[in-house]
Amino acid sequence: MGSINAGGPAERDAAAFIAWLDTQRQVDRAKKVGTQGYCMGGPLVVKTAAAVSSRVGAGASFHGGGLVTNNPDSPHLLAPKITGRMYFGIAANDDMQQPDAKAKLREAFDAAKVPAAIEVYSTAQHGWCVSDMPEQPNGQSIYSKADTERAWGKLLALYKTALA
């Protein structure tokens, strides 16, 4: 997989897509847009919010992978370029695999003075929002209706507040 660093293909695509949306008569360009991502879509949310900060009023990542890395192009390092509100819903098993990620996200967004809510869903596994996610090898369902409804509520509240 190629790098998705600042100014890369993901950012160019995000800028082009939002520019295209802005040509649609149904779009109120006086209002901000929101973006959300699941799994690897999480870093794309951060990259979109940084690349098109003048238009992105809110971004949300659910069970996002690769939000914090040791690489110089780690998505969390883009926090200073973001002006919208952010929400990060972290799966319990993702938190166990990378327990320092939430603190690094918090530090980056606090230092940038970007409003960001960061929560660990203590009963949710990576992929919990995907209703047709295959079961784990032990037969346990990954999809969690209760956690998905909680996440959906957080997303709607974020959009209502940040995109009004």
Image: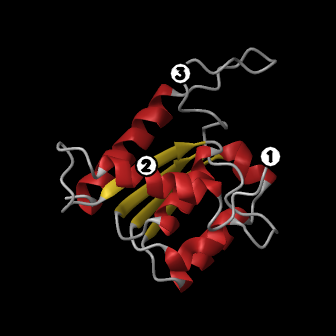
Residue that extends furthest to the top in the rendered view of this protein: 139
Which residue shows up at 36% across the image and 70% down it?
54
Secondary element type, mark 3? loop
Residue under circle 1? 1
Secondary element type, mark 1? loop
Which residue shows up at 58% across the image and 25% down it?
143
Residue type marked 2: Phe
Residue 57 at x, y percent in the picture: 34, 63
Residue type marked 3: Ser
- Regarding residue 119, the answer to whether it shows in the image is no
Asked where in the image residue 77 lies, by quadrant, the reply is: bottom right
Q: Which mark is residue 17?
A: 2
Nearest the eye: 73 or 91:
73
Nearest the eye: 52 or 40:
52
Asked where in the image residue 55 lies, by quadrant, the reply is: bottom left
- Regarding residue 147, the answer to whether it shows in the image is yes
Earlier sequence position, callout 1 versus callout 3:
1
**Do callouts 2 and 3 mark residues in contact (Cβ within 8 Å)?**
no
Residue under circle 3? 131
- Colour approach in the figure: secondary structure
Side (left or right) of 151 relative to 33: right
Secondary element type, mark 2? helix
